[in-house]
Image (cartoon, rainbow, N blue to C red):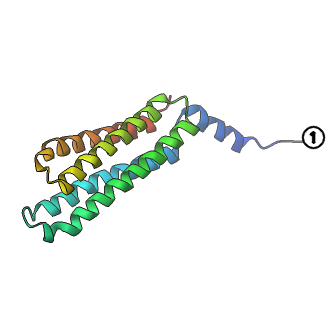
């Protein structure tokens, strides 16, 4: 009599049916960490308001953080689309996240490079909305469907 071990196959099927994906959740979690750090770095360079040369390194770190967040969001969205296409909430949410991160980075560039400091009134609230979107995506990634 031959027996077949189906325990690993059953586990894979259960995970696939649950609609959860650890890679997507991890990537979105990393986006959340970077977005949170963006606020910290902004606070550090805003301490030197009016003294750009003293704040320049933190402004560059903040800009690089935006690029990292965009790359991680793209990776998370690709994973959601490829691995969990049925979870439209994840990959559409990821697309919205990418668009908003790019918009946020563009506004930040205008503030830094073109001296449009008045756009800070849009940049900061948009950052808060991004934090909320990342938290929502994290919660949705953990939800079984």
- When asked about the image quadrant of residue 39, the answer is bottom left
Q: How many marks?
A: 1
Query: Going by the picture, which residue comes out furthest to the right?
Result: 1
> Which secondary structure, mark 1?
loop
- Which residue, given by chain and number where applicable, does mark 1 sit on? 1
Q: Quadrant of residue 45?
A: bottom left
Task: Spot the residue most to the bottom.
Answer: 54
Up/down of 120 relative to 91, above or below: below
Query: For this rendering, which residue is in front, 95 or 25?
Result: 95
Q: Which quarter shows the N terminus?
A: top right
Residue 59 visible in the displayed image: yes
**Is residue 135 in view from this perspective?**
no
Residue sitting at x 60%, y 36%: 16
Q: Percent from the top left, x then y, of residue 64?
A: 32, 60
Residue drawn where x is 24% and y is 45% of the image? 127
* Residue 87 appears left or right of 128: right
Say which residue appears at 52% left-offset and 42% top-offset.
78
* Position of residue 126 measured from the top left corner of the image (x, y, whole percent): 22, 41
Residue 109 image point, x, y percent: 24, 52
Q: Nearer the viewer, residue 141 or 49?
A: 49
The local crowd at label 1, few if under 14, some if 14 to 19, many if 20 or more residues have their Cα within 10 Å, is few
Is residue 68 found left or right of 56 in the rendered image? right
């Amino acid at each position: 009599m031959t027996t077949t071990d189906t325990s690993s196959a059953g586990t894979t099927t259960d995970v696939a049916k649950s609609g959860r994906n650890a890679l997507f959740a991890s990537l979105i979690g990393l986006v959340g960490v970077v977005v949170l750090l963006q606020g910290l770095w902004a606070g550090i360079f805003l301490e030197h308001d009016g003294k750009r040369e003293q704040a320049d390194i933190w402004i560059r770190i903040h800009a690089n953080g935006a690029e990292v967040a965009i790359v991680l969001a793209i990776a998370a969205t690709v994973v959601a689309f490829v691995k969990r296409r049925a979870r439209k909430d994840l990959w559409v949410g990821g697309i919205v996240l990418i668009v908003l991160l790019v918009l946020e980075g563009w506004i930040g560039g205008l503030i830094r490079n073109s001296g449009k400091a008045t756009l800070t009134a849009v940049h900061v609230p948009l950052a808060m909305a991004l934090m909320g979107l990342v938290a929502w995506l994290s919660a949705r990634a953990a939800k079984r469907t």
